[in-house]
Amino acid sequence: MEYGVGHMVVRNCGDIDRYLNQVRDAAGKIQAWVAAQHGDPLDLLRRMKFEPSGFHPTLGHPLNIIEQVNQTWTYVVALSAARHLLEMHPQSGGYVLAPGADAAIELDIMSEAPGLVGAETFAAVDPRNNKKLKTDLMKLAARTEQHRYIFFMSPRFPGFKRLLQFERDGVQVWSVDV
């Protein structure tokens, strides 16, 4: 099956590790760039926000650093969730991941076995910010996949664990910690 730009297909933990290494490599480039910077701190922040000094976490094209930070954690959460889903649903045939804003499929994670697993993923200081958790719960409640999940990373919910207090309509909610 062919997928568009920005999609990742993971069928085993080796695939996940390969993508995580790409994310780590892109982060390393930014670490080196920041370490080499001198001069006015406001100019540095301006360049981080507005200039394409960063890189897409897996595709490598230029991004501003702020967007790279956001995309990095979006991808890390999706890859961590996929690792968990591979363990929980080995019959899935693997997963298609499209966590970035430029990689639109119906859900952030969908099993290659049609109708089996669907998930939304995100990273936020608080999962209730911008009603993201509520919006994803409503979206998944209307879906027909046999197994539906939300995975998020937030410093307010450390650890990789199921959060029953947020669940509704058969949608499991998990915190991710990496």
Image (cartoon, rainbow, N blue to C red):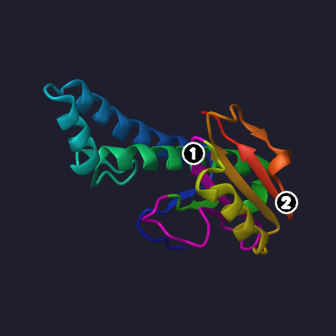
Q: In which quarter of the image is the N terminus?
A: bottom right
Task: Out of 42 and 89, give the one closest to the viewer.
Answer: 42
* Residue 78 relative to residue 37: left or right: right
Q: Where does residue 147 sit, x and y in percent of width and height? A: 80, 62
Residue type for callout 2? Arg
One can see residue 147 in this view = yes
Quarter of the image that includes the C terminus: top right
Q: Which residue is drawn at 85% across and 46% down?
A: 164
Residue 9 in the image: state x and y as whole percent. 55, 59
Residue 49 vs 108, above or below: the answer is: above
Q: Is residue 94 magenta?
A: no
- In three-dimensional space, the C-alpha distance between marks 1 and 2, rounded to whole angstroms, equals 20 Å
Quarter of image, res 93: bottom right
- Specify whether residue 114 is painted magenta: yes
Q: Which residue is drawn at 44% across and 50% down?
A: 71
- Please tell me how crowded label 2 is: few (under 14), some (14-19), or many (20+) other residues with Cα within 10 Å: few
Depth check: 30 or 44 in front?
44
Q: Give the range drawn in magenta.
A: 100-125
Image vertical order of residue 104 relative to residue 159, above or below: below
Read off the residue under disc 1: 124
Quickly name the residue at label 2: 168
Q: In this view, does 14 lie above or below 155?
A: below
Q: Residue 38 carries which label?
A: none
Q: Which residue is drawn at 21% across and 34% down?
A: 42
Whole-percent x, y for residue 151 in the image: 68, 50
- SS label for mark 2: loop
> Quick one: label 1 or label 2, which is nearer the N terminus?
1
